[in-house]
Amino acid sequence: MVTSEAEIKTFQKKILVWYRVHGRHDLPWRHTRDPYKIFVSEIMLQQTQVDRVVPKYKNFLKQFPTVKRLAYAPQAAVLKEWQGLGYNRRALYVKRAAAQVVKNYKGAFPKNPHELEKLPGVGHYTARAMCAFAWDMPEVFIETNIRRVYIHFFFAHKKKVIDAEILECIQKTLPPEHIREWYWALMDYGAGELKNISNPNRKSIRYVRQSKFEGSRRFARAKLLDLILLESRLTLKKTQALFERDPLLAMHNPKEILEALARDGFIKKNGAVWHMI
């Protein structure tokens, strides 16, 4: 745990000096203060590597350059643009959130984290990250790379570190200005300088090894959604034939997957045919 002002200044200097030399200064969402563009980047970056997000982010904003354009876009068009990022619920979240911003806030994202949390797909982290990155507000939040940095520097000899302890440490070390640059520096240090050491996050009580994607239920949902986006219409018979041919899909019940996609708002059934909403 942080113990003195001198320790805080030493820590801040180390992170910022490293960032000025090695930071990912070319990331496109770091060259805007538009809360809509920052919102899109934050949702895309959830559980997805930065290198995969950059081209999708650029293409997405070409198709939907404003929150209003996204709010009124066909859902199928949004999902098609999202293909390749995975976790397709996020595509629904960004569209539904855009619709709420247009309807409830006249197209302007609220500058209050508690108001932001009312939007679909926006939790504690995303709301506060938006406030920091769009408006330089001194919010306290944590994500994987930030957690890695603080455990490495301040909890190296402790097991089962809880986020409440780390958040207290983040609060104490938060600089008085340039908040967004500080958080970028922390993220880049965790993703860059600490990538070749034993992962400090193993000491966090929140640490969970990510399950395998191929063959999982999420894999089956993604394959089926890709097929419906390609063909527009799908029958249960055709879905069953697809699942029977692919050993990675064969363990799943196609009817259950279709019904789950319908419950989540991706597709709907008309007679014997399933199609995009």
Image: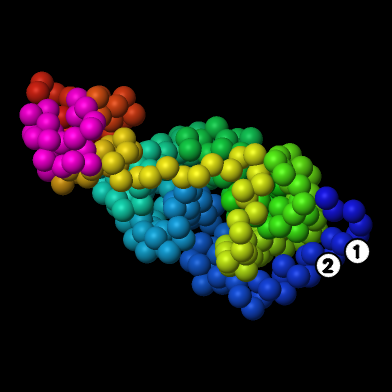
Q: Which residue, given by chain and number where applicable, does mark 2 sit on?
A: 10
Mark number for residue 258? none
Q: Total of numbered circles in the picture?
A: 2
Question: Is residue 234 inside the magenta stretch?
Answer: yes
In the visual, does 29 lie left or right of 140? left
How far apart are the alpha carbons under marks 2 and 1?
6 Å
Which quadrant of the structure image shows residue 244? top left
Q: Provide residue 44's location: percent of width, then percent of height.
A: 44, 51
Name the residue: 55% across, 70% down.
24
| Image location (x, y in percent) of residue 197 | 61, 63
Residue at 92%, 57% (x, y): give it: 4
Q: The C terminus lies in which quarter of the figure?
A: top left
Question: How dense is the environment of label 1, judged by Cα within 10 Å: few (below 14), some, or many (20 and up)?
Answer: few
Q: What amino acid does circle 1 point to?
A: Ala
The magenta region covers: 231-255
- Badge 2: residue crowd in 10 Å (few <14, some 14–19, many ≥20): few
Q: Quadrant of residue 164?
A: top right
The answer to whether residue 135 is visible is: no
35 horizontally vs 200: left or right: left
Q: Amino acid at mark 2?
A: Thr
Determine which residue is flagged by label 1. Answer: 6
Q: Marks 1 and 2: in contact by CB < 8 Å?
A: yes
Image coords of residue 50 (percent x, y):
46, 61
Q: Secondary structure at mark 2?
A: helix
